[in-house]
Amino acid sequence: MSMPFYVSPEQLMKDRADFARKGIARGRSVVAVQYADGVLFATENPSQALHKVSEIYDRIAFAAVGRYNEFENLRIAGVRLADMRGYAYDRRDVTGRGLANAYAQTLGTIFSSGGEKPYEVELFVAEIGDSAADDQLYRLTYDGQVADEHGFAVMGGAADVVGGYLEERYAEGASLADALRLAVEALGHNEAEHRVIEAGDLEIAVLDRTRSQPRKFSRLRPARLAELLGDRTPVPTAEPAEQPTDQTGAPAADTGDDGPPVAPPVS
């Protein structure tokens, strides 16, 4: 009689975590930056129809990285939950923290279940308040863990490199234009080079508390992005002029003009 195949729970959880992390790392990074008037989301996304950043409710936004069909299911579920709670109780009862907890329970249950594969997604849930001190930004991982972020956060892709760039340059209370430029520069930064991402290849959205209407979510279109980003042409580094040499390869004497070398005076 053959022995049944056995995998320890520790190894099973490790394999599921590695599987989810590899899937998330294949996507492009998503950056969330808190600025003076709200929260900005930025990612490189050439598609004009398949969004990574979306509105959930009046003051709540959702961003994700990973498998599109999985985080789109989570987004739709979040919209339905927020609408039902706001309709049954009050719109003020719909909070980013409540939505983040609901997502955490769903992701944690799926990750620990042996019947299906874990979701290859990471999420941002952001809510803005009446002032910058009241803004909330939550990051949720594939296994249901929730982290309360402050200032900025990065997920997916080369998150370590992009996060290090932001950590060196982030400043609280920045304007929208400054926060946007920083986020886009961070997305184009990697260890080998610094790319300039075209405005048409960017997906940018904000939760803006200065908007007069109750719904604070807004997308920034390419024309508006080009206006805010300005000239981003990289300045080439000037190379030092090559020093002339004589026939032996040694540096030639400095003559001071184009004529023959001047002999030193005889003492």
Image: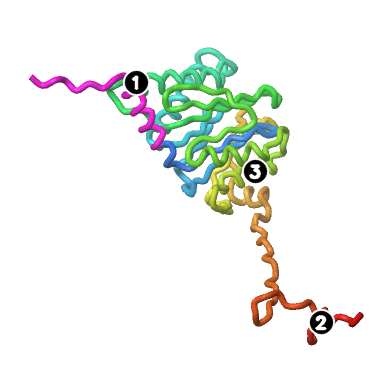
Q: Which residues are magenta?
A: 1-23
Foreground disc of the pair 3, 2: 2
Nearer the camera: disc 1 or disc 2 = 2
The answer, for residue 162, to whether it is visible in the render is: yes
Q: Residue at x 51, y 33 (%)?
A: 63
**Image quadrant occupied by the N terminus:** top left
Pinpoint residue 261: horizontal percent, then vertical percent: 79, 84
Q: Nearer the viewer, mark 3 or mark 1?
A: 1
Disc 3 residue type (three-letter)? Leu
Q: Amino acid at mark 2?
A: Asp
Left or right of residue 135: residue 201 = left
Q: Which residue is mark 2?
A: 257
Element class at badge 1: helix
Judge from the rendering whether residue 233 lies leftward or rightward of residue 69; answer left or right. right
**Which of 224 and 42 lies nearest the eye of the viewer?**
42
Check disc 1 and give the amino acid type: Glu
